[in-house]
Image (cartoon, rainbow, N blue to C red):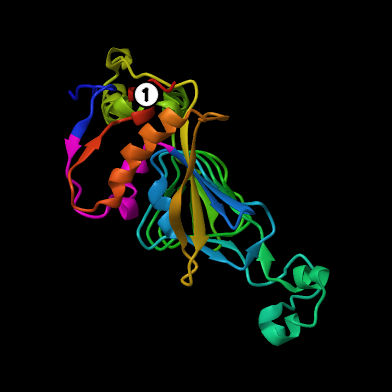
Amino acid sequence: MANKLDPNALYRMQFPEDPLKSTDLFKQYEISITIDNMHTINIGRFSTPIVNRLTVIGRPITAQIFKCGAFCEAATDAQIVVSGEHSNNRSSNITFGSLGDVYALFLSEDERKAYAPNGPGSEIGNNVILSTSSVVLGGTIIGDGTLVAAGAVVTSDCEPRSIYGGVPAKKIRDRFDASTRDHFDLLKMQDIRGHCVHLINQWSLLLEKGMSFESLEIEHMPRRPRIQFEGTIGPDRKVKFLNILGYWIGDEAIVSPKIKQGLDDYFNQLLKPNVPVQWSPDIFYAMGIT
């Protein structure tokens, strides 16, 4: 059985590629990405690869483009399409694209907003799985613990702890039985401390054998650490990380210059690809920021 990691230790690690792109060293923290000082993308702990599945089209109506809970997974060819190129909330769908950009030069600011392509954001709960070739469209909410089957196209909200499939996606059945659902809720995966996360599978195995999981001593945190990034939408309509703007514990911003410098020094290791780094299962915890 696996042992817990030391929450105060720094482990020497070698990553095979640029960690800034793979986001490996950011996975145990919540991520907020601010785009153009107007829009945000919020990603839960251990869900950072979901960012690579996002395609942002047009200008979103809502300030929050996308929100994702903790421990979500998506196949490499799964897609999450947020916003949209058409104004489906009005009687006409005329946008700059159909008018031609030159017409925008003759519009007032209010008219520019009216003719700009826009659409709603999307939200995904904790422990959601998006299977191969699945597509999630803007304006939809997927509940905690739900699995979207291969090739499904999500066009409306999905209930928690369910399996959805088809085009458009419909509920096939519950994902868990009552007992597993209760254990899932009890685990509170989104709050597990970084040095205990690798014990989750052990927890599941013990439950399957009808054994107590209390011996694992899984710890939970009262407030989750978060990193705030500046980002942008690239020509390929994908989200790009630019730089770190700040650090948070729960709703409290970290303002101490000394602590911020320590965190900067740690995360700046990610700018040096193929160089060994000093990795912590939770650098906030290791620095006493609780």
Given residues 122 and 237, the one toward you in this image is 237
Query: Does the magenta portion include 31?
Result: no
| Horizontal relation, residue 199 to residue 114: left or right | left
Location of residue 26 in the rendering, given as x and y in whole percent from the top left corner: 36, 42
Given residues 175 and 189, the one toward you in this image is 189
Given residues 6 and 276, the one toward you in this image is 276
The amino acid type of the residue labelled 1 equals Tyr
| Horizontal relation, residue 286 to residue 93: left or right | left
Q: Residue at x 18, y 48 (%)?
A: 275
Seen in the picture, residue 222 relative to 236 is either above or below; the reply is: above
Residue 65 in view: no
Say which element carries label 1: helix
Give residue 241's quadrant in the image.
bottom left
Location of residue 20 in the rendering, given as x and y in whole percent from the top left corner: 33, 52
Quarter containing the N terminus: top left
Q: Which residues are magenta?
A: 12-29
Seen in the picture, residue 134 relative to 227 is either above or below; the reply is: below
- Mark 1, Cα crowd under 10 Å, few <14 / some 14-19 / many 20+, is some
| Horizontal relation, residue 192 to residue 229: left or right | left
The residue identified by callout 1 is 285
Seen in the picture, residue 261 relative to 16 is either above or below; the reply is: above
Given residues 40 and 276, the one toward you in this image is 276
Quarter containing the C terminus: top left
Location of residue 258 in the rendering, given as x and y in whole percent from the top left corner: 42, 29
Q: Residue at x 34, y 41 (%)?
A: 267
Location of residue 149 in the rendering, given as x and y in whole percent from the top left corner: 43, 54
